[in-house]
Image: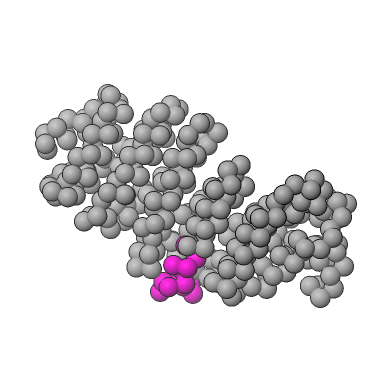
Amino acid sequence: MLKDFMNQVKNLQQNINIQEAISTLTEFTIIGDKNNQDLFDLFIEEKVIDEFLRILKKTTEADVIIKILSSVSMLFTNINNNLIVLLSLPQLNEFIIFDYNLKKDEIPDYYINFIKIISNKLNAGNIQLFFNSKYCQFPLLLYSQNFYNSPDNLTRIYTRHLLLHILKITQESKLSPILVKYLQSYPFLQVLANHMQFMRELFAKTKEKHDNFDEELGLMDHFFKDLSQMVPQLKQIIYSCRSQFYRNIRKQQIQKMIKKLNVLTPSCIFYKMIFILAKDCKLEYFL
């Protein structure tokens, strides 16, 4: 089996029968985790994950991208004895932040599933593997929120659930003080701004088109309430913005707000949003 493993590694390196090689190496690695540590060790020593990443960066074929995403997801789903080794691989963040062509059929589903699987492995004991405290970067949290306005309702709901799940773990972690600072700065504030922008659009549709978005508006309201309870430091920011969605905001005022927001720098866009909304709506107690 070790010989077969090495043959498939060579095929991968030489771009021969790529999809078959990826599948076989994934299966061998899972078997190795359960019954043959030497097989799993070969996966690490031969830097197979680097080969997966190399192919991912070069290919334009959706089938190959899907094969890599599904195989990496399988590894993290089925590896138990050596899970911490997998989670420690620096290449993991590269799979998270890679610029997938999410417009191609099925790729978004596989990417979301991959993010979901990785997030489910996150806990207070290993969160330091995902959060770079030196540069204050949290790719898993940031990129998991790219689907906040997905056309699929279940995906939108899951995106918000995932954010709350990750934030709950951050509160239990020893890194909590550093993580809270991250949550109060850019780019995380942009994540919140995106969710609030989407909520504002739902509100506008309900008011202008009389479509039935009441259920999702209610879900988002609960989402922001849960968020403010988990991270009290964000409570005033969230409350100030949430309040605006339940005021009679005229179309002209919304257009004026958007025009003003277009000239703002990312680092201050969130706080300016509060100020502009409050000013335009004459909510003096927010100013």
Q: Is residue 224 magenta?
A: no
Indicate the position of residue 230 as horizontal and vertical percent values.
54, 72
In the rendered image, the quadrant that contains the C terminus is bottom right
Q: Is residue 232 above or below residue 72?
A: below
Indicate the position of residue 247 as horizontal and vertical percent values.
81, 63
Q: Magenta stretch?
A: 166-178
Q: Residue at x 85, y 73 (%)?
A: 284
Q: Quadrant of residue 133?
A: bottom left
Q: Main secondary structure of the magenta part?
A: helix
Q: Is residue 168 magenta?
A: yes
Q: Is residue 241 above or below residue 233?
A: above
Judged left or right of residue 239, residue 131 is: left
Q: Residue at x 25, y 51 (%)?
A: 79
Indicate the position of residue 196 as horizontal and vertical percent values.
68, 57
Q: Residue at x 38, y 39 (%)?
A: 69
Q: Residue at x 43, y 51 (%)?
A: 116
Which one is in front, 39 or 159?
159
One can see residue 266 in this view: no
Judged left or right of residue 145, residue 241 is: right
